[in-house]
Amino acid sequence: MRPSCATIDLDALRANYLLAKRLAGGRTLAVVKADAYGHGAIACAKALEPIADGFAVALLEEALPLRASGISRPIVLLEGVFDPGELTAAAELDLWPVVHHEAQLRMLELASHRPRRIWIKINSGMNRAGFSPREASSVWQRLQAIPGLEAPVWMTHFACADDPRSSMTLEQIQRFHRGVATLPGETSLANSAALLAWPQARGDWARPGILLYGGNPLLPHADPDPARSLRPVMTLSSRVIATRWLSPGEALGYGATFVAERPTRVGLVAIGYADGYPRHAPTGTPVAVEGWRTRLIGRISMDMLTVDLSPLPEDVGQGAIVELWGKTVSVDEVARAAGTISYELLCHVKRVQRIHRGVMITP
Ligand SMILES: *Cc1c(COP(=O)(O)O)cnc(C)c1O
């Protein structure tokens, strides 16, 4: 079998969740949308169920398999529902939809069967989704007229929490609190970046995603504490399946973009962009072979890529284990080299076998 796999360390996932919860100092939803950022939502939710206060997904279809596999904690639908039928399904499965625009609020008012709890999204400056802080009290009035509904969770989302130098997060926190301070209900503000960089963003419910998977969302200039304690959850690995020497002047791969300047030993690795490795990762992107850090050379192909084995001992060759990202090379480093973010790399992993490791705790 092709030796390419994504190994998921569920113990690291749980450790990261507990770190998030410590930072939050309150109830903490584990965000498992997009198949738990490519880590397998059911396995991750089951591993977290005994310790997590709840979960969040983007949409109904992501919540259904979680409930079907026995997850009984609260599940928030971050994008809310798309039609009245979904509201009925949410009610039956005790899912908590976010309501972030007028049409969703109308649906809720007109529904015959509705969830007992909803989250209301307030636009505090990101200007993507949500009611304005000014509208919050009129939304509250309308919610009060709906029978059987508990007080909502008022939530907002940050545009620049990854940048500790930006003043935008504090402005958003202020605008949010000005809108909802006097209204009944609970609050939810912090994503991963806010948990790591903005203690002022604490609320009743935190919503960490990437942090659970060991990704550091903060910009490179940010203070690395407490992100230093994050443990990588996914190791994306494959093996060297062939080696060859390039003489000076010989080119490598599509576009002949890499030309050897000195005798260069090349390892051919069985993974490529069809497996989710970013095609834009340039020559020089870090990679680890048998635990030694070295670099990619040449373009990424659909099914293969090439690495520089020249700095490594001669006996590291065919069959050597290659870590594309994991404990030796962080997914953040690869993302930075490829001009993207860890989120995108993790979500895009496909075609490789996914293996979950770690002790399953039964509640
Ligand atoms: C995805 C999402 C999160 C989690 O974000 P991270 O940056 O991964 O922590 C939190 N809140 C909302 C509304 C989201 O859509």
Image (cartoon, grey):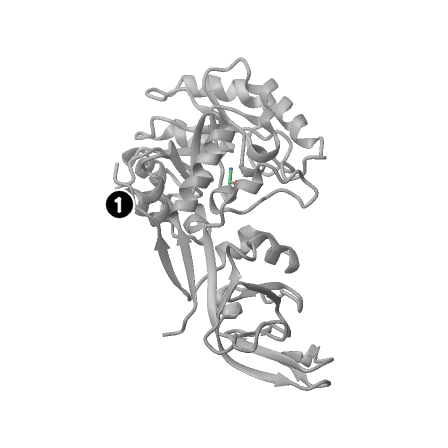
Amino acid type at mark 1: Ala
The residue depicted at 63 percent of the width and 72 percent of the height is 311
Q: Is residue 230 visible?
A: yes
In which quadrant will I find the N terminus?
A: bottom left
- Considering depth in this image, is 272 or 181 the residue closer to the camera? 272
Res. 80 in view: no
The x and y percentages for residue 303 are 50, 74
Give how far across and how far down residue 341 sits, in percent.
60, 52
Image location of residue 177, percent across then percent down: 59, 20
Q: Is residue 132 above or below residue 283?
A: above
Give the labeled residue for mark 1. 68
Query: The C terminus appears in which quarter of the rendering?
Result: top left
Say which residue appears at 36% left-offset and 40% top-offset. 48
Front in this rendered view, residue 81 or 313? 313
Residue 250 located left or right of residue 75: right
Is the residue 126 above or below the residue 181 in the image?
below
Give the residue drawn at x 35%, y 30%.
111
